[in-house]
Amino acid sequence: MLPRLKARLTDRTASLITEIEQSLHLCPELHAMLTEGLADDCPLATADGGYIRAGFDEELDNLRQLAQGGKEWIARYQAAQIDETGIPNIKVGFNKVFGYYLEVTNAHRDRVPATFMRKQTLKNCERYITPELKEYEEKVLAADEQAKERELWLFQTMRDSVHEHLRQLQETAAALARLDVFAGLAELAARRGWVQPEMSDQIVLDIEEGRHPVLDTTMPQGAFVPNDATCSAEDGMLMIITGPNMAGKSTYIRQIALLTLLAHVGSFVPAKRATIGLTDRIFARVGASDELSRGQSTFMVEMVETARILNTATPRSLVILDEIGRGTSTYDGLALAWSITEYLHDRVGCRTWFATHYHELTQLSESMPRLVNLNVAVREWDDQVVFLHRIIAGGADKSYGIHVARLAGVPTAVNERAKDILAQLEHDHRDQFDRSTIAPPKSSSGGALQMTLFGYCDHPALDELRGLDVGSLSAEEAQAALQRLQTRAQEIPAIG
Ligand SMILES: Nc1ncnc2c1ncn2[C@@H]1O[C@H](COP(=O)(O)OP(=O)(O)O)[C@@H](O)[C@H]1O
Ligand SMILES: [Mg+2]
């Protein structure tokens, strides 16, 4: 194949292709030796010989002929013995223990001549040896043995000359591997309508009608919904993507990272048009791959990965975060997701897409200028949810988890009950203006953030405190009230 490949690569203008072409070594002497020397159907093991082609080595040919000729002689010898003794069924046989022998059935035993020396007696026959047979046996076996030795020696010589071409062969293999990658990407680009991305040294990203390279191929033609993605200092650097489960959040953010990666390895990308700013690293925190065997819980793995991102990402990095804080309690998870968002926005400032089911995070856009809320379009009618897989501006205000549970086959009773509980929870945690009691944190004077998100933790003790008419209490009553309140307060788990 090599000469044909090399021929197709000559006189190309692309320097990479020229480089590959020059690294393809045809090694004509080696090629000639192997084609001339090796038989067409080489056996798997060298033990029985037969892998060196006839006509390649004169000495081997002679030895083989001798071994062959010897066998022919035995056939002739058998015929001659039948003739001489008049025993019609004399047979020459061979086994590993006794070598060659003449076999005479018991019916003809009395016609055996004196020159036959008995070697072995079996139930129905006797086996004999003659001096001539012995002599030829030695010749044949020796020739066969020598031929095998010669073959092995030739093989080892060939192997040595392959080894002499080691560097050229390895360079050729590496060049072929590169060529294979380029050819694969080129074929994909041509077949699936990928476009050449424009690389930019600005910290931007602008994809029009991008598609997930894998889902776009595995889903029926045209079923995958393309989506845009933009990111720049003006348009926003940190995108919060909310929306129900199964809407396509993970797909969307992975698609952005994959297209960025493809562009950086020199590939075309599945999109209508794409501008990709040079990126020093792509960080992805996705999926919940347990590493229990290494003694790390899902949440620990999640945090280790997050820590790595926060500690190493630069403004030139691209970060995708898929569901931070799922592996712990809701408040814990939300608080972490919240502060991680702030850190990425305020300190790192890198291009970030963060898919989250905490739609409370969408409130952060009020205080963070470069934060953009996106969500996945969903059509709701008749208590049913249809996923449109289209990314649109704005934050989601519902998570539809219960709808997804029903789609998955969770019993109706469980879903109905969950709906009631949800309504109750939502009612309990809304203030008089019907806003969630989880509020965006306010920056106080020193810039330190006061988290009010634990407003959820309302406690009966607070009600009592609110109801106390302090002015009318005697000193003893005040002390008793304080005592009571303290006891109740101690029941509240400490935060932080
Ligand atoms: N853009 C899209 N077009 C068509 N189908 C999609 C698209 N995005 C996602 N899907 C389908 O929806 C499924 C769920 O997507 P996923 O990204 O895992 O959702 P989420 O992360 O929001 O729960 C995918 O496996 C895929 O079948
Ligand atoms: Mg997801």
Image (tube, rainbow, N blue to C red):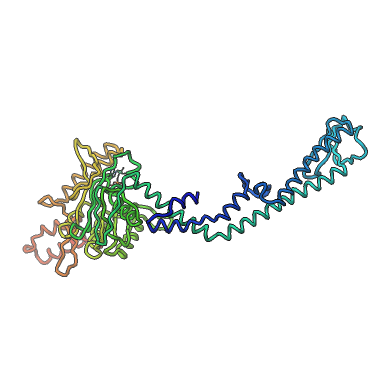
Is the residue 157 above or below the residue 43 in the image?
A: below
Question: Residue at image x 12%, y 63%?
Answer: 477
Residue farthest to the bottom, as pictured: 446
**Image label count:** 0
- Residue appearing at x 73%, y 47% in the figure: 64
Q: Where is residue 112 in the image (x, y as percent from the top left)?
A: 90, 35
Q: In what quadrant of the picture does the C terminus appear?
A: bottom left
Is residue 359 in view from this perspective? yes
- Residue 21 falls left or right of residue 238: right
Relative image position of residue 208 (x, y in whole percent): 24, 49
Please provide percent x and percent y for residue 330.
Answer: 26, 53
Q: Which residue lies furthest to the right in this view?
A: 114
The correct choice, above or below, for 473 with respect to 414 in the image is below
Percent x, y of residue 75: 80, 37
Residue that appears at 71% across and 48% down: 61
The answer to whether residue 492 shows anywhere in this view is: no
Q: In which quarter of the image is residue 87?
A: top right
In this view, the residue farthest toward the front is 11
Q: Nearer the viewer, residue 439 or 196?
A: 196
Q: Is residue 125 left or right of residue 254?
A: right
Quarter assignment of residue 460: bottom left
On the rendered structure, is 33 left or right of 324? Answer: right
Front one among 386 and 263: 263
